[in-house]
Amino acid sequence: MQAGREVPTTSKCVPLSLPKGSERLCELCQGKAHLQCRKCRVTFYCGAEHQQADWLGIHERICELLVPIRTSTPLHPKHADYVELQLKKVELAEICRSVAQSKLSERKHLEALPAAQCCLRCSVDIYGPSTVQLVPAYLLLAEANMGLGNLALVGELLCQAEWAVLKSPDCGHSVHQQLHRSLGRLHAATGNLEEALVNFGNDIYFSSKEHGLDSPVTCAGYFLMADVFAKQGKLPIVRSLYSQMAHTWHSHLTQLLKAHGQNVHYPNPLLKASHDKGQRLEMDEMLRTMLAFQQNDPRNDPTQVALVSHCLAMLWFLGGDLEKAESE
């Protein structure tokens, strides 16, 4: 438990106080609940461990917002209060999505689970089952479970996401790109490397359609594909992909650096405005992996080593870490 974040107390569920035929289920595991949040009184848990996990994961942010949503009676779409209730549900789903994404960017997979689960349940309530609007929530939940090694569950979640996309082929390039990236990562983790390459190829295709060939998002697809080729021992292809990525990153960071020079009077580092923390961590990880590969490559190319090292220095400088930038 993090310091300074007090978890509110719970009270026991009293079966006789529940409507006849109803049963309270744990917010996290859907098992029989024995406790309820004393603050909102509309959220239930099987025990203190899940209550604490949910509080740290998402409940602290949404406790009060849940009250009007979970205490409302079913409304007809033409009812005066229906739209207001739906907007509250949309707000809830967006908060959960944002929190889950933030925790995943910091590699806090276990903490991200409650927010991702709540996002999916709320999205189902808003849009109905098996709709394409559920795909982002499925992907968040899949990414959290991927980080925890729950690959069988990841496969089930991605199957549901894929089915929703197949029913809505015009859902947009971004949704297709994110789905194929998740599928590629699953196949790479389970050793199905050829299928991983197919999905990363589709990832790159849809990413280039949405963001352009020289986009950092597309570049990440090339990196994942290079990792698969490295596992297959196809080093010439890895060198080619890393070289292309290095030039793309160098051009992108150079443009940011020039823009930074034109805005020297603004105190905030420019990179923090154009990339969130998760993206910066991902960029750093990719560049470090590329640098390690090139430094250990028997066909060491000093030009490529210098290019990637310069990318890392620019990344750290733009992120405000001058000490690391100077050391590089």
Image (tube, rainbow, N blue to C red):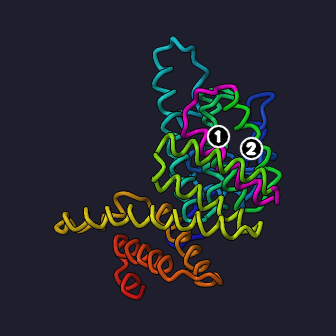
Expressed as whole percent of the image width and height from the top left, the position of residue 116 reads: 63, 48
Read off the residue under disc 1: 120
In this picture, residue 175 sits left or right of residue 248: right
**Image quadrant of residue 7?**
bottom right
* Residue lying at the far top of the rendered structure: 78
**Image quadrant of residue 317?**
bottom left
Read off the residue under disc 2: 157
In the image, residue 192 above or below residue 107: above
Q: Quadrant of the C terminus?
A: bottom left
In the image, residue 295 above or below residue 229: below
* Magenta region, residue range: 167-192
Instruction: Tell which of 1 and 158 is nearer to you.
Output: 158
Q: Tell me what residue is drawn at x 66 percent, y 51 percent.
A: 200
Q: Tell me what residue is drawn at x 63 percent, y 38 percent.
A: 135
In the image, residue 186 above or below residue 168: below
Q: Amino acid at mark 2?
A: Leu
- The answer to which of marks 2 and 1 sits earlier in the sequence is 1
Expressed as whole percent of the image width and height from the top left, the position of residue 35 reads: 72, 51
SS category of the residue bearing label 2: helix
Q: Residues within 10 Å of mark 1 (few under 14, many from 20)?
A: many
The reply to whether the magenta stretch includes residue 40 is no
The reply to whether the magenta stretch includes residue 168 is yes
